[in-house]
Amino acid sequence: MKIEKPDNHVQWPTEFGRRFLISVDTEEEFDWDAPFQRSGHTTISVPKLLKFQEFIEKHRIKPIYFVDYSIISDAKAVAFLRTVTEQKTADIGVHLHPWVNPPFDERVNDHNSFAGNLPKELEEKKLVTLRDAIHDKIGVRPTTYRAGRYGIGPHTVELLIKHGFVMDSSIRPRFDYSGQGGPDFLSVGSQPFWWGDDKRLLEVPLTTIYSGILRKQSGLAAPVMNKSPLINALLSRSKMLERIPLTPEGISARETKEAIDVALDDDLQLLVFSFHSPSLSPGYTPYVRTAEDLDGFYDWWREIIGHLEIRNVQPVDMGQLLEAASGV
């Protein structure tokens, strides 16, 4: 499924200024290089969520945790999520990993790991099952969604609106997952937009920035870069064109600060950061293998938050974001 360039971008009020949002794909640990499977996962990183929350609260930042079924089935995770919800120090969203989310009516394979590829009725059942489980366990009914593997499909927007969701954050701009059976986001930029003229569902894409002397021609180069790791590496190393998602996972602080500056120069008013919760424990993602890597993970955040403060980019939470976008 190819997502076309949107034409209904959000018009931010003057007082919105420049803001940033931190989002966490809160999920089980699994082998990223192995085939998908329904069982055999762990939730060892759950206790580490508290350390990250304490760290981020010191900077007066309210993150959003996109929670999947394995997490909401973990008692320690439920206790943590209930606490931050009651204290209003974090927001909660839905994060659908189809292979671990009932009902289990589909085959487990790459194609079906993108929830948007499932039959409409099954995608809906899984979405509602997870949303209701979160409500039952922590007492809030989430209205924000991020598909696992960014896997939205032809029925996702319709289903989200039908079930009262007001915000989606499934799009990863300038990435193409069609080679794996997933969506193609090459035509989509990082500006938030409305799905439809009725403004019932706000799309808040993750932020991806092109940097380098060829960045104005990125639309032409992006498909080639996406299909050829060699060309991507050559352009990146030569600094001619770098595709930089805002994440501590595989992206250096230097690159990220450069991307922030480019985004601000281009008048992008909202920056959306993300990472996967298993990165909070060494050994469960390719990005944090050792205790030293974990120290570097937190150092990355310290450096980036400091840079955001210097550039006068203020944190925003989901409620403030929706209010500003809606002009309320």
Image (tube, rainbow, N blue to C red):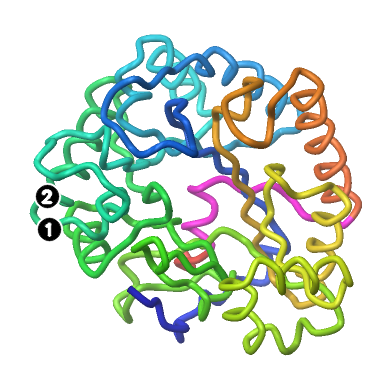
Is residue 3 visible in this depiction of the protein? yes
Report which residue position mark 1 lands on: 119
Q: Position of residue 21 (x, y in %)?
A: 62, 49
Query: Front-most of 267 and 299?
Result: 299
- Magenta stretch encompasses residue 315: yes
Dot 2: element: helix
Q: Is residue 240 above or below residue 204?
A: below
In the rendered structure, which segment of residues is drawn in magenta?
A: 311-324
- 282 vs 47, left or right, is right
Tell me: 90 left or right of 146: right
Q: Amino acid at mark 1?
A: Pro
| Residues at circles 1 and 2 in contact by the CB criterion of under 8 Å | yes
Q: Give me the residue at 49% from left, 39% from top.
A: 33
Q: Position of residue 58 (x, y in %)?
A: 75, 25
Q: Which residue is mark 2?
A: 122
Label 2: few (<14), some (14–19) or many (≥20) C-alpha neighbours in 10 Å: some
Left or right, 74 with respect to 187, comes to: left
The part of the image, by quadrant, that contains residue 126 is top left
Residue 233 lies in what quarter of the image? bottom right
Q: Magenta segment: does it hold 290?
A: no
Residue 117 or residue 319, whichever sits in front: 117
Q: Is residue 27 left or right of residue 165?
A: right
At horizontal 46% and vertical 62% (from top left) the residue drawn is 171
For disc 1, the neighbor class at 10 Å (few under 14, some 14 to 19, many from 20) is few
SS category of the residue bearing label 1: loop
- Return the x and y of residue 315 as percentages of the image width and height: 69, 47
Q: Position of residue 235 (x, y in %)?
A: 79, 74
Query: Front-most of 246 and 42?
Result: 42
Q: Quadrant of the N terminus?
A: bottom left
| Residue 40 in the image: above or below residue 110 | above
Amino acid carrying mark 2 in the image: Leu
Residue at position x 62%, y 30% from top?
279
